[in-house]
């Protein structure tokens, strides 16, 4: 019911047609927050990591190229990413906004994305740069458990499944992602520093860019994100 108190501030409505990019190192909580924000805004979460893992599981040509690179913590070539994102953004459910989790990840990808979306309105284009101290990233990645069936993620301490090591949604046995093992994590962090961190300067000043402290409980991070996308008054 509407709040009719005389001085009540209008509650911001979820932003129409939002386009959101999440930047941040591995383990910052991008996927966790992207999923929650997608539910809040009723737009799809598009995770390139999930799409690539699906391709690996399905044994497609893309999966056969991506698999060995991902397992070692390297990046998949830009031209493949441009293609899968280009196809995904043309799908019907992405016509009224979307949340990108894990893309773009290189300057080349950012430029390609800009070309694909040239002409789209920019006022509802948000970039969230999620910051988390490195020792915490290592704890989150080493404790993450993952459902190979529905791609839900858990954490052995922060977000354990209800029933021992089974996914809450489909009771599949949870596993550790191959790229969450120590050597691959070191490579992923190095790739982030070298190839993805420069996107922070690329997007600062170009869009509604917000650095978010991700070293807080998930609910606190989400409350801040909702406040930002909730309406123009909150930006
Ligand atoms: P991708 O799947 O995108 O992995 P990532 O970017 O490395 O990110 P993560 O999924 O590891 O972390 P996250 O920030 O989403 O954190 P999460 O919410 O899960 O990519 C994997 C690989 O695919 C890449 O290495 C690359 O090879 C390839 N790839 C993908 N996109 C590509 C692209 N564009 N170009 C080229 N290659 C590409 O949280 C982590 C853990 O912490 C969880 O256990 C979670 O429960 C917990 N957690 C979350 N939030 C909090 C919190 N606030 N407090 C405490 N714990 C928390």
Image (tube, grey):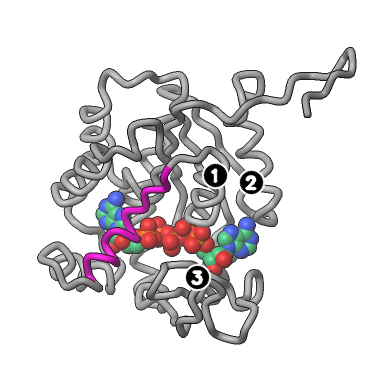
Quarter occupied by residue 164: bottom right
x, y percentage for residue 34?
A: 49, 48
Residue 211 in sight here: yes
User: Split into 4 quadrants, where in the image is the N terminus?
Assistant: top right
Q: From the image, which quarter does the C terminus lie in?
A: top right
The residue positioned 24% from the left and 41% from the top of the image is 109
Q: Which of marks 2 and 3 is in front?
A: 2
| Residue placed under numbered mark 3 in the picture | 141
State the SS at label 3: helix
Q: Is residue 82 placed above or below 136 in the rendered structure?
A: above
What kind of element bears circle 1?
A: helix
Q: In this view, does 182 lie to the left or right of 131?
A: left
Mark 1 neighbour density, 10 Å: few (under 14) some (14–19) many (20 or more): many
Dot 2: element: helix
Left or right: 135, with 198 as reference point: right
Q: Is the distance from the Cβ of mark 2 to the nearest ligand 1 atom less than 8 Å?
A: no
- Residue at 45 percent of width and 40 percent of height: 43
In this rendering, the answer to whether 231 lies above or below 154 is: above
Q: x%, y% of residue 80?
A: 15, 51
Residue bearing the label numbered 2? 222
Residue closest to the far left = 61
Q: Do the residues labelled 1 and 2 touch (CB within 8 Å)?
A: yes
Whole-percent x, y for residue 81 in the image: 21, 49
> Where are the magenta residues, as a range?
44-56
Q: Does the magenta stretch include residue 194?
A: no
């Amino acid at each position: 019911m509407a709040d009719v108190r005389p001085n009540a501030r209008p509650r911001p409505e979820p932003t129409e047609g939002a386009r959101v990019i999440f930047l941040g190192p591995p383990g910052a909580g991008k996927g966790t927050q992207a999923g929650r924000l997608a539910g809040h805004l009723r737009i799809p979460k598009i995770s390139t990591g999930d799409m690539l893992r699906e391709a690996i599981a399905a044994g497609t040509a893309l999966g056969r190229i991506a698999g060995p690179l991902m397992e070692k913590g390297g990046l998949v070539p830009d031209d493949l990413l441009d293609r899968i994102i280009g196809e995904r953004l043309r799908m019907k459910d992405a016509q009224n906004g979307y949340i990108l989790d894990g893309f773009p990840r290189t300057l080349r990808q950012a430029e390609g994305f800009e070309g694909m979306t040239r002409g789209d309105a920019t006022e509802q284009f948000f970039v969230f740069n999620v910051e988390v101290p490195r020792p915490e990233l290592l704890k989150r990645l080493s404790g993450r458990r993952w459902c190979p069936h529905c791609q839900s993620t858990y954490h052995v301490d922060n977000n354990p499944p209800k029933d021992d090591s089974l996914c809450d949604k489909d009771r599949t046995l949870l596993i550790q992602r191959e790229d969450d093992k120590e050597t691959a994590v070191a490579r992923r962090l190095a790739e982030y520093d070298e190839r993805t961190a420069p996107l922070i300067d690329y997007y600062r000043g170009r869009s509604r860019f917000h650095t978010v402290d991700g070293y807080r409980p998930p609910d606190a991070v989400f409350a801040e994100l909702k406040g930002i996308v909730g309406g123009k008054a909150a930006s």
